Image (cartoon, grey):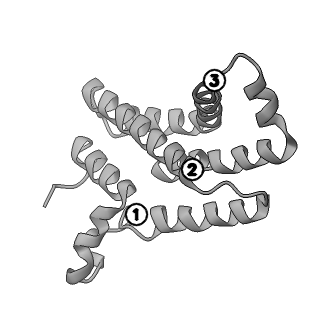
Amino acid sequence: MINIVFSVCIYSAYEETLYAIEGLRDFFLASPLTSFEFRAGLALGIFLTALPSVAVCLAMLFIMAGCGVTELLLTIFMVLVLWLLSVLMGYLIPIRRNVLATGNIIRVLTIVFVVLPPIYYPLTAWPKPLRMLAYVFPTFNISEFMKIVLRIEQYT
């Protein structure tokens, strides 16, 4: 679920670059929308593409893992925090006039923030001196919080 939300929502930078190249950003900002409203709408639209997959994952957690309503609500809150972080990270990528360069930067960032941190494998797989470095990645922290809330793994 973390991979779905992060990899889809960080593409806000790609959409922003595409709109800048096509001149749609100027068209939207010439309307009564403020820049914040435009970007918030873009971020919400990007999240809507990830919503069906997230809904299926949440339904599976609720049905198969037997988590309660409280755990489900906390998980939804953490998904929303991850959405906000990934969209903001996407907006922090320098906007370029080259869609391919922006897409490549996003792919590398997705690998760095989703595959490298111990999200899909235990933290003990990392060498001891490097374990504190894992806490730099927000995706790792959110995955640890989800594991604690869903009682998947005891916090150590």
- Please tell me the numbered disc located at residue 34: 3
Residue at the spot of label 1 = 120
Vertical placement of 45 versus 92: above or below?
above
Residue count near mark 3 (Cα–Cα under 10 Å), binned few <14, some 14–19, many ≥20:
few
Q: Is mark 1 on a helix, strand or loop?
A: loop
Decide which of tag 2 and tag 3 comes sooner along the chain: 3
x 39%, y 32%: residue: 76
x 57%, y 50%: residue: 90
Pick whichever, 77 or 120, lies toward us: 77
The amino acid marked with disc number 1 is Tyr
Residue at the spot of label 2 = 90
Quarter of image, res 95: bottom right
In which quadrant is the C terminus drawn? bottom left
The alpha-carbon separation of the residues under discs 1 and 2 comes to 23 Å
The amino acid marked with disc number 3 is Thr
Decide which of tag 1 and tag 2 comes sooner along the chain: 2
Vertical placement of 116 versus 33: above or below?
below
